[in-house]
Amino acid sequence: MKVSVTVNGRAYEHDVEPRTLLVQFLREQCRLTGTKIGCDTSSCGACTVLYEPEGGTGVGKLESVKSCTMLAAQADGGRITTIEGLADADGTLHPVQQAFHDHHGLQCGYCTAGMVMAAVGFLDENPAPSERDVRLGLEGNLCRCTGYHNIVQAVLAAADKVQA
Amino acid sequence: MIPAKFDYVRADDTEAALAAIAEHGDEAKFLAGGMSLLPLMKLRLATPTVLVDVGRLRDLSYIRDSGDHIAIGALTRHREVETSDVLARHCAVLAAVAGEVGDNQVRHRGTLGGSVAHGDPASDLPAALLALDANFVAQGPSGTRTIAAGDFFQGFLETALQPDELLTEIRVPKSGANGFAYQKFNRRAQDWAIVGALAADVNGEQHVALVNMGSTPLRATAVESALAQGASNADAAEHAADGTEPPTDLNASVEYREHLARVLVRRALEAANA
């Protein structure tokens, strides 16, 4: 079946099997491999991208979803932002990316794309979070390097920067 | 992990969804948000040959004040239940429990109707709706019928819905912001409850529901009748595991679940009545 999506502002259309997962579509068809497959069971959040269905959800913005637990077919006609779509064209990092860099919010980096996307979606919903809010907001993302402390500090710093 | 092959049919309205499911028979399944069904399909524990995607039936996504109850469209997402002003005023307990489902990403996709139709005894919302004496509206080839939550959950992932029926609406009685508390015990934040306990004041009665203490969501009837007879929260909670047949799995033995049920029901009752 034909699936058309807009990813990071660019239109993609590919003919895929109905069982194709959104994360496969992004990585193998769109060749955007920044989005990672981690647990593949919607636990770890490494595959998190921002998504708005065709016609919107009524909230008027993109929301974090786990692309390993969504069919590409479900996303047909929708808008997606992946980690590749965050930085400006001139290479200036998104405030959340910069904050992860500044606060060393990663060790091995495997969870990072998903963490950053979940954090961007979370801050869009809650621009002035407490530390507890951040921890709850990121509960769908696992870091096995036990790096949560710096990740939380990064997200709080990014919130301050976006607010300022 | 990739699901087994299936044909995909996108329904643009309720009639088209019912027609598609009637055409393809009981090998077909409705797909709403997919937060329960897709993981089962990826593990090949479910292998429907046709998926009828009802995820775009936006006319089944609403939360309305309908006089004595709140009507919620089956395709309403957990995030919308969690943040609804109408529910905050008239059924705060349901909004609070919706906020405990999975994680943000899951709540952005998962739907109330999907969770109910899946009927997982380890899910938060089916037990909450059982505690609240909710009613479920189902539409099928022979018309529309209303099913009480108490008659709906019949076995493990088995509900009163016929294969050709679509759950369209969930009705919860108004309970305002009456005392309630949900105690969910799990190892990782976004996991299903190892055991969960909900205490809620429904029209002046204390209702108690249990998550993951049997093959269906359960009411802790022994606790409720002890409370009705004047038992203290702590004494009533001692009956939390009475008559239950909890599962054994990697997380917990039967005995541990029974212990958790007693502790969590006591905590829920104390918090609900604080």
Image (cartoon, coloured by chain):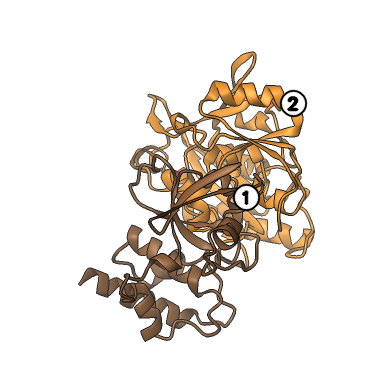
Chain colours: A brown, B orange
Asked if one can make out residue B98 in the rendered structure from this viewpoint, the answer is no
How far apart are the two marked residues, 1 and 2, measured between alpha carbons? Answer: 46 Å
Q: Residue at x 63, y 43 (%)?
A: B226
Q: Position of residue A118 (x, y in %)?
A: 45, 64
The numbered disc on residue B236 is: 1
Pointer 1 indicates a residue of which chain?
A: B
Mark carried by residue B25: 2
Residue A113 appears in view? yes
Report the number of numbered marks. 2
Return the x and y of residue B145 as percentages of the image width and height. 59, 19
Looking at the rendered image, the quarter that the N terminus of chain B falls into is bottom right
- In the image, what residue occupies the spot 58% across and 29% down? B167
The residue positioned farthest toward the top in the image shown = B142
Q: Nearer the viewer, mark 1 or mark 2?
A: 2
Q: Chain of mark 2?
A: B
Nearest the viewer among B227 and B153 is: B153
Q: Residue furthest left?
A: A164
Circles 1 and 2 on the same subunit: yes
